[in-house]
């Protein structure tokens, strides 16, 4: 039988018509002489009716069918006696005249339904079953819709879709590379690209002018809910473009995706926020602007405080900052606050000072030190009776990281966030360099090919501090998540050489790592810039999913293992031999 339409698209317009549908048995109800089967395919469910008196053969097929068997059925579409408002096909059903079991199934390892009670690893091991759940299939459909819009948008704006290599040279850009040994050249390795960054710059040198690609990227880094070892970028680059032009192009894409994929109108242009303002007010370079509870500096008010933790911190040139939790005095106990204090110690905070605002003044462990300053503090903080005030003292990054975490975690606990909002904004004017505690050195805040602000080029000269420089870079943020970023690129080889030097590369080391790029800069590189969107993270936010793993068909788990195929796995000794590799330790199985 040839399928006439998807089961989930069977409609009232087909009443009286004969149709053929094929799909999985989602539910089966045997009422004696009648059997009802909910037949599922990617577009939804339709109810099949098997009547023993009308058609004995098809009734026997339904009698043998079980959950997740695959059926084909031919029959007449008719109106249902009782409408089911929970499904799109709830006003009709199919009276089956002929049916056949196309494939049998074992009992599924978990219920194929949205509110499934199964571990993530079990769902990933049987991902092909997991993806039959309506929610998961809808995630895939949304992702497909977004990528379709992306292709259409850039095609209509004169961008060329160009593929770049996935076996290339190792040019570490912050994270560790995944490397691939060469059989032909023993001891030599390819690297999987962390991004197409260098190649898209070379495409601008080639005169492509406008490039885009939906590109696979690979980074060997510690994982979390919104990271994967392999991920997908919407990558773009434009010659002769200013930051505002690139941002306007990106806003046009976002506006179309929001309207056509999720039916939401977002106003453009998006707000612009300086990096410094984002850190000062939100404690984050990816601020969530859906709620207030802004961070405020009170260093000047407590610099002479009898509370030595505060006064000594300010005397050392550091900061005392605070947030006000509205109505938080009754909502947070001393035990609750102690848990928060323990958590922020991971950011380097020595403690969490707090007071509750009452009619009589402050109440709490440090109240006696601050009551003399209460009026000034309340005025600065707009604190009212019943509020909870949380203070953190320390260096710039300690107070930002600590209060940024507290602000977001408390907002979630108090349900202060409107989950139906989509707040986009640009964070601009980033520092060119940042100190990475893990690497123990200065690194590029975005990447080493980012152009500095013209006024900051002086910081690259001998005797100047390059770490004061800011870059022509910008991130696009959605609801407290960075979904993309970009910059104007360096097109002057002398500037690029100075940036490499500031990052600790000798001239020889820079030439060894990036010689091909330096050569391109010396052979006519136009002024250019671009950006990249994290497709997985963006779709996750549009879908209100919990993790990017939900919107990737076959993801790795939190331990970088793909349970379905048990990757990574060992290989035969013969394979290692032809690659001239030895494994010194007996490999343990991936968990």
Image (cartoon, rainbow, N blue to C red):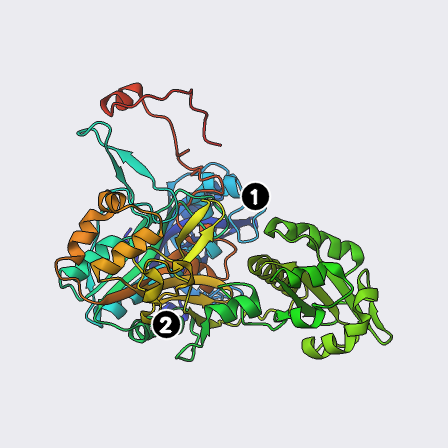
User: Which residue position is annotated with label 2?
Assistant: 260
Q: Residue at x 61, y 49 (%)?
A: 346
Q: Quadrant of residue 322?
A: bottom right
Image coordinates for residue 159, horizontal then vertical, percent: 20, 67
User: Which residue position is annotated with label 1?
Assistant: 118
Vertical arrangement, residue 176 with respect to residue 279, above or below: above
Instruction: Judge from the rendering whether residue 166 lies leftward or rightward of residue 324; answer left or right.
Output: left
> Could you say which is closer to the camera, residue 497 or residue 256?
497
Q: Quadrant of residue 202?
A: bottom left
Instruction: Judge from the rendering whether residue 139 lies leftward or rightward of residue 310; answer left or right.
Output: left
Q: Residues within 10 Å of mark 2 (few under 14, many from 20)?
A: some
Q: Residue at x 53, y 65 (%)?
A: 86
Image coordinates for residue 402, horizontal then vertical, percent: 61, 58
SS type, badge 1:
loop
Instruction: Judge from the rendering whether residue 333 lies leftward or rightward of residue 489; answer left or right.
Output: right
The number of numbered badges drawn on the structure is 2
Image coordinates for residue 312, horizontal then vertical, percent: 69, 60
SS type, badge 2:
helix
| Residue 40 visible in the displayed image | yes
Instruction: Judge from the rendering whether residue 523 lies leftward or rightward of residue 123; answer left or right.
Output: left
| Residue 81 visible in the displayed image | no
Mark closer to the chain start, 1 or 2: 1
Name the residue furthest front: 463
Q: Residues within 10 Å of mark 1 (few under 14, many from 20)?
A: few
Vertical arrangement, residue 105 with respect to residue 572, above or below: below
Distance from disc 1 to disc 2, alpha carbons, whole Å, reads: 33 Å
CB contact under 8 Å: marks 1 and 2: no
> Could you say which is closer to the camera, residue 338 or residue 77?
338
Q: Residue at x 75, y 63 (%)?
A: 354
Task: Give the label on residue 528, or none.
Answer: none
> Could you say which is closer to the camera, residue 500 or residue 328?
500
Image coordinates for residue 300, horizontal then vertical, percent: 66, 72
């Amino acid at each position: 039988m040839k399928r006439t339409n998807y089961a989930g698209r069977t409609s009232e317009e087909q009443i009286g018509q004969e149709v053929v549908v094929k799909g999985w048995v989602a539910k089966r109800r045997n009422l004696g002489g009648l059997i009802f089967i909910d037949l599922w395919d990617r577009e939804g469910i339709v109810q099949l009716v098997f009547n023993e008196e009308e058609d004995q053969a098809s009734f026997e097929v339904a009698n043998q069918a079980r959950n997740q068997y695959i059926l084909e059925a031919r029959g007449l579409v008719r109106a249902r006696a009782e409408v089911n408002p929970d499904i799109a096909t709830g006003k009709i059903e199919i009276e089956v005249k002929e049916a056949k079991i196309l494939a049998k199934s074992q009992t599924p390892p978990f219920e194929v339904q949205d509110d499934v009670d199964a571990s993530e690893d079990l769902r990933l091991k049987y991902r092909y079953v997991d993806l039959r759940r309506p929610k998961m299939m809808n995630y895939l459909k949304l992702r497909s819709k977004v990528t379709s819009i992306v292709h259409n948008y850039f095609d209509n704006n004169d961008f060329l879709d160009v593929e770049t290599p996935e076996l290339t040279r190792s040019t570490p850009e912050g994270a560790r590379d995944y490397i691939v040994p060469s059989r032909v050249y023993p001891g030599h390795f390819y690297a999987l690209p962390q991004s197409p960054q260098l190649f898209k710059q070379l495409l601008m040198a080639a005169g492509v002018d406008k490039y885009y690609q939906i590109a696979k990227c690979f980074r060997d880094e510690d994982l979390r809910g919104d990271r994967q070892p392999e991920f997908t970028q919407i990558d773009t680059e434009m010659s002769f473009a200013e930051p505002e032009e690139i941002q306007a192009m990106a806003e046009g894409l976002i506006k179309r995706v929001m309207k056509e994929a999720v039916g939401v109108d977002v106003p453009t242009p998006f707000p612009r926020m300086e990096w410094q303002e984002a850190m000062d007010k939100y404690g984050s370079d990816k601020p969530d602007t859906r709620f207030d509870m802004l961070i405020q500096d009170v260093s000047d008010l407590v610099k002479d405080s009898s509370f030595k933790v505060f006064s000594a911190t300010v005397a050392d040139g550091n900061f005392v900052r605070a947030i006000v939790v509205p109505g938080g005095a009754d909502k947070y106990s001393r035990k609750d606050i102690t848990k928060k204090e323990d958590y922020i110690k991971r950011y380097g905070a020595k403690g969490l000072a707090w007071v509750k605002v009452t009619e009589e003044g402050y109440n709490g462990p440090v109240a006696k030190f601050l009551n003399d300053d209460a009026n000034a503090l309340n005025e600065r903080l707009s604190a009212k009776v019943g509020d909870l005030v949380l203070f953190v003292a320390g260096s710039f990054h300690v107070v930002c990281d600590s209060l940024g975490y507290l602000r977001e975690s408390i907002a979630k606990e108090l349900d202060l966030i409107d989950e139906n909002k989509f707040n986009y904004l640009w964070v601009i004017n980033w520092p060119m360099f940042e100190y990475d505690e893990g690497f123990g050195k200065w690194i590029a805040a975005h990447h080493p090919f980012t152009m500095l602000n013209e006024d900051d080029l002086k910081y690259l000269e001998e005797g100047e501090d390059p770490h004061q420089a800011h870059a022509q870079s910008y991130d696009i943020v959605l609801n407290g998540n960075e979904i993309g970023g970009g910059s104007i690129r360096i097109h002057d080889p002398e500037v690029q050489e100075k940036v490499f030097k500031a990052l600790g590369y000798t001239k020889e080391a820079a030439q060894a790592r990036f010689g091909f790029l330096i050569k391109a800069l010396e052979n006519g590189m136009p002024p250019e810039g671009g950006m990249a969107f994290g497709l997985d993270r963006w779709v996750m936010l549009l879908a209100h999913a919990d993790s990017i793993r939900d919107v990737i068909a076959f993801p790795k788990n939190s331990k970088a293992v793909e349970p379905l195929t048990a990757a990574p796995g060992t290989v035969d000794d013969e394979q290692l031999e032809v690659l001239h590799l030895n494994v010194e330790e007996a490999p343990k199985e991936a968990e």
